[in-house]
Image (tube, rainbow, N blue to C red):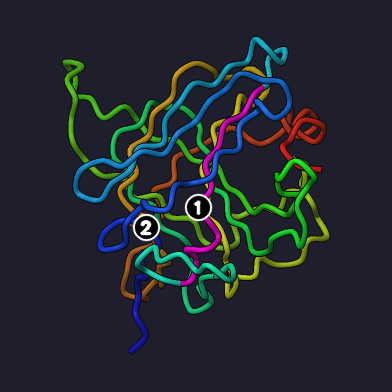
Amino acid sequence: MPTSTLFLFGSSTPWLPPPWITTDDRVRGGASQSYLSTLPDNCALFHGHLDTSTLGGAGFASQFSDPKVAGNTTSTVHDDEDGSWDLSSFDGIELEVGNGDEKIYTLMLKDELPAEKREDGREKAGLNWETDFRVGKGQNDEGEKKEGVTKVWVPWGDFRATYRGKEKEDAGSLKTGEVRRIGFMMRSHFGRQDGDFSLELKSVCGKKVHRTESMSELNQKPAVVEASGWLGWISGLCTVS
């Protein structure tokens, strides 16, 4: 029987090493910063500071997995080539997250990598597949920290294709058999959020939905704002060209 879950990060698969790759708005003169750090029990923390004053209300900060760890569950680095995860037998991605801050985060997938890099060593523009989600602060009624896990279920059809921040309607379908990178982004949504951000990450996995499993149990992704104003701005600002 095919496995119903494949952990890409978390559980028995380490988040680090190698370090995740930083892609912040500093490449366009901004001042935002992001990090992905390890926590006990093989968890991770995506955190940093989103600055919107430098770029007039806009900003982004993101972390991407190293493409050389893709295709395995041990974070082994392939020195000679980039790998990929074959998730074609699964129905989507499930995140398990701990405490958040009620801000809107973006989960990003890449199913292709640019053949060449820019002269400064940065990657050229590529297609992203993304979806937004939001997680609460994990506090009780008295404002005390409350431990817990929120499952965020994202079926493949919920990922939208973007290129340089613009939605790309002719992108075709996500190549679920060739997922090369996983990423997390914090963006301003054109001035709607800024400042410090922090999200505890428990795991990222490919998941197959069983008919006996209630879809209401899986569909726990909180409502988020629609992507709109940030798209035009980020098309000229994003890290790659």
Quadrant for residue 53, please give it: top right
Confirm or deny contact between disc 2 and disc 1 (CB under 8 A). Answer: yes
Name the kind of residue labelled 1 in the image. Answer: Ser
Name the kind of residue labelled 2 in the image. Answer: Phe
The relative height of residue 200 versus residue 217 in the rendered view (above or below) is above
Q: Is residue 205 left or right of residue 123?
A: left
Quadrant for residue 143, please give it: top left
Read off the residue under disc 2.
Answer: 9
- Of the numbered discs 2 and 1, the one sitting upstream in the chain is 2
The relative height of residue 110 versus residue 138 in the rendered view (above or below) is below
| Residue range (magenta) | 59-71
Q: Position of residue 72 (x, y in %)?
A: 42, 71
The kind of secondary structure element at disc 2 is strand
Taking depth in this image into account, of 100 and 236 the one nearest to the observer is 236
Which residue is at 67% across, 52% downward? 128
Crowd band around label 1 with a 10 angstrom C-alpha radius: few (<14), some (14–19), many (20+) = many
Q: Is residue 210 left or right of residue 192?
A: left
The relative height of residue 228 versus residue 68 in the rendered view (above or below) is above
Read off the residue under disc 1.
Answer: 65
Which residue is at 57% across, 31% downward? 61
Marks 2 and 1, how far apart at CA: 10 Å
Taking depth in this image into account, of 157 and 18 the one nearest to the observer is 18
Which residue is at 33% across, 64% downward? 214
